[in-house]
Image (cartoon, rainbow, N blue to C red):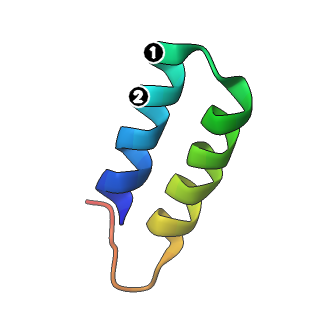
């Protein structure tokens, strides 16, 4: 899930789509906030 969000952010940056980038950023934040995901 997090990887998919990161890929979306990379693609959005590459094509210069800021709206898509913001959506990907939101998806990344929610992926990070999932209880099973712990940042070390």
The residue sitting at 56% across, 58% down in the picture is 27
Return the x and y of residue 19 as percentages of the image width and height: 74, 33
Say if mark 2 contacts mark 1, CB within 8 Å. Answer: yes
Mark 1 residue element: helix
- Label 1 Cα crowd, 10 Å radius (few <14 / some 14-19 / many 20+): few
- Eyeballing the image, is 7 above or below 18? below
Q: Which disc, if any, is residue 10? A: 2
* Residue 7: quarter of image: top left
* Residue 18: quarter of image: top right
- Is 22 placed left or right of 4 in the picture? right
Q: Quadrant of the C terminus?
A: bottom left
- Eyeballing the image, is 36 above or below 18? below
Mark 2 residue element: helix
Q: Quadrant of the N terminus?
A: bottom left
The residue sitting at 34% across, 84% down in the picture is 36
The residue tagged 1 is 14
Residues 38 and 15: in front is 15
Q: CA distance from mark 2 to mark 1?
A: 6 Å
């Amino acid at each position: 899930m997090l990887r998919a969000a990161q890929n979306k952010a990379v693609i959005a940056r590459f094509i210069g789509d800021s709206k898509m980038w913001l959506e990907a950023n939101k998806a990344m934040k929610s992926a990070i906030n999932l209880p099973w995901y712990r940042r070390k």
